[in-house]
Amino acid sequence: MKYQNNAAISHKAAMMFQAADGTANLLHEDVCLPACAIKRSSLENNMAWMQNYADARGVSLAPHGKTTMTPWIFQRQLAHGAWAIGVGSAWQAKVAMEAGLPRVLMANQLVGKANMQLISELKEQHSATTFYCCVDSLSNALALDEFFRGRGQTLDILLELGVPGGRCGCRSVAQAQQLAQEISTLPGLCLRGIELYEGVMHGADAQQKIELFLREAAGLLRELHQQQRFGEEEMILTGAGSSWYDVVCNIWGSESLPDNCRVVIRPGCYITHDQGIYQEAQNAVLARDSYACDLAGELTSALELVALVQSVPEPGRLIVNFGKRDAAFDAGLPQPVAHYRNGLPQEGGTTGLTTIGIMDQHAMLTCPADSNVQVGDILVFATSHPCLTFDKWKTLFLIDDQYNVIEQLDTAF
């Protein structure tokens, strides 16, 4: 067994031991725990499933890269057939462009001189990559036009359509039409399509509101196309997060769109899925959509937190060595799914174990008073809302189903 000198440690889940052949295993405590792991089999399954879905619906896939911010994953999504990677900021665009993506869709406004300068330099350095961002105001459009035109560049933009009380976006079709007209006079900008995010709409009638919103967007695109606001290039109509992508495909698939319109969906959390809010969302998709039901396989949870029991202070209570600094807790607490000791699964698994509280570096669990869980045992946890687990780790471990480390994946948050 080789020992990793601590001078080489650069992140909190450092690999400290390796076998002579260079392998390491999380269940053998070769890595400082807690550690965040991704099961390769589930990851590859999820990438294939969503790409197959997009292909079956005749749409393009631009997964939202801000979920993982892991260039290795971006490249695997591209290899599976993704048309682009979606991002939310200039920094995220830099990571995606430097990873070699052919198209980067920033589903957000580009504001501020420094952010504009970064994108301008990236456009020069990665001229083979097409970059898009969103606009929803004349003031932003004017600032972008002045900046990029002054550097001899043209910025590809998408008109963002929003809803009252929502996030960004023009609050009405009329406002969007007026802005498109004004953008047509700005030589530094090229209007390439329409972007929206339907996930801000909630309530018992959310689906009805979303369907109306999507039809309004399709109608707006047709009108702007007739007015020749997009020129003769391919136009883009894009929406769909991880909860309503089937509805987006259904509505836009039933609309009469111009022949040169590309529909792009942007789910992100499917990549590792979860056993919380996105499992619930996927169950709803399966209940609504025959296309999803007809595809082989299903999305499976790929992201796990591997941690140690550090205290059993009283009967019925366990303390585990991870906390808010390590895992998402905004949409449900991480829950135990497996129990190991000395690398072996324990009889009874995690029956009766429930996470009830979380602090910065501690998770509190209840358990049966006669539980056999001991200090030093390993518990594996599934999480809800993968975005806010990914961003807490500089390095992730890609593992096989036996928890052998296949590769270390660096994130770029």
Image: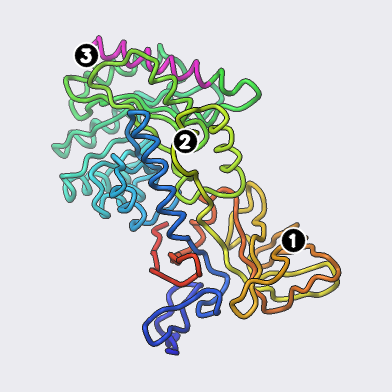
Q: Residues within 10 Å of mark 1 (few under 14, many from 20)?
A: some
The amino acid sitting under disc 1 is Thr
Residue 136, horizontal then vertical, whole percent:
38, 26
| Residue picked out by circle 3 | 228
Q: Secondary structure at mark 3?
A: loop
Residue 187 seen by the camera: yes
- Element type where label 2 sits in the image: loop
Residue 325's x, y, as percent? Answer: 59, 62
Are dots 1 and 2 in contact, CB under 8 Å? no
Residue pointed to by mark 2: 241
- Badge 1 marks a residue whose secondary structure is loop
Question: Marks 2/3: CA distance?
Answer: 29 Å
Near-viewer residue (177 or 21): 21
- Along the viewing direction, whichever of 386 and 79 lies nearer the viewer: 79
On screen, residue 305 versus residue 185, left or right, reads right
From the image, tell me which residue sits under label 1: 351
Between marks 1 and 2 in the image, the one whose residue lies nearer the viewer: 1
Please state if 80 lies on the left or on the right of 294 as rendered: left
Magenta stretch: helix, strand or loop mostly: helix
Decide whether residue 277 is among the magenta residues.
Answer: no
For residue 113, what is the image quadrant?
A: top left
The mark nearer the N terminus, 2 or 3, is: 3
- In the picture, which quadrant includes the C terminus? bottom left
In screen coordinates, is 311 left or right of 326? right
- Give me the residue at 61% from left, 75% from top: 344
Residue at (45%, 78%) from the top-left corner? 24
Q: On screen, 337 above or below 341?
A: above
Question: Which tag, 1 or 2, sits closer to the chain's start?
Answer: 2
* Residues rendered magenta in the picture: 210-227
Vertically, is 255 above or below 351?
Answer: above
Query: Identity of the amino acid at label 2?
Result: Gly
